Amino acid sequence: MNENVDASAVGESFSGDLSMWGLFLHADLVVKLVMLILMTASVWSWAIIFEKRATLKKLARRAAKFDDSFWSGETLDKLYERVKKGRQDPLLKTFCAGMEEWQTGVAGGVPSSETLQASLRQRVERAMAVTINREMNALERGMTFLASVGSTATFIGLFGTVWGIMHSFTAIASTNNTSLAVVAPGIAEALFATALGLVAAIPAVVAYNIFTNALDRYADRLDGFTSDFAAILSRHLDTLETGKKKAA
């Protein structure tokens, strides 16, 4: 008789709604907190994913456009005067940093000694390297969060599952009823936490790997541009030195 009364009480406490919203409302406070953390992490991860995808596509288009201008035969001074007034991106900022250091170094005339010329090349490369590091750090913002979500969301969801199952067993013990109507809701709530953990973790891991490769390729592109730019300046210095020797 007591079992029937307890079972009916449990049935009344649970509406029978096994939808996601119903499972969330009926969950224990700790499990609700876990679910809210995972849902927030998932939404934030998707915001980072969409932002990073749009940013990388825009940077690829602008880099291709700048490469066409850089190798079109236009003088570097004219190209610099044109692009420094426009909208800047990491590649343009790297180019402008190199040109600013170059123009500062040759403001009083091209260095005559090889030592001074080598020092100028080093300063140009250093200025571009510093700019690349700063810009890549800015581009990588949010990647740590994706990595953290990808590595911890499943464990957070598992914690919610374990806690929910413990809560379910406590309810079973208090009602002395092991019917499916009593057991199923609590188990469903607990497993829902694990499902949310996977929903948050899987996109974060996939996006992190994709964006890491894309950012590495973009960093390699900036490093390659720095090498090309330094080679052009070295040839320019060699040409000027050769011209001086012939004039002498």
Image (cartoon, rainbow, N blue to C red):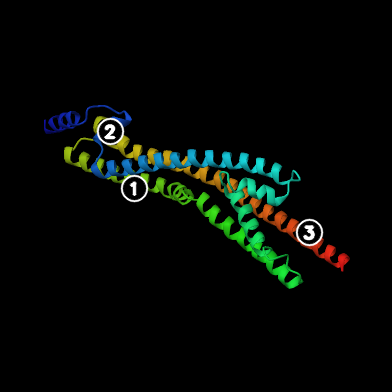
Name the residue nearer the viewer: 244 or 1.
244
Q: Amino acid at mark 1?
A: Phe
Name the residue nearer the viewer: 78 or 33.
78
For mark 2, what is the residue?
A: 185
Which mark, residue 235? Answer: 3
In this rendering, does residue 184 appear at all? no
> Which corner quadrant of the image does residue 246 belong to?
bottom right
Q: Residue at x 40, y 39 (%)?
A: 43
For mark 1, what is the residue?
A: 159
> Which corner quadrant of the image does residue 61 belong to?
top right
Residue 192: image location, x then y, percent: 35, 37
Bin the neighbour count of mark 2 within 10 Å (Cα to Cα): few under 14, some 14-19, many 20 and up.
many
Residue 179: image location, x then y, percent: 24, 32
Q: Residue at x 73, y 72 (%)?
A: 115
Residue 44: image location, x then y, percent: 40, 42
Please report whichever mark, 1 or 2, sits nearer to the chain's N-terminal start. Answer: 1
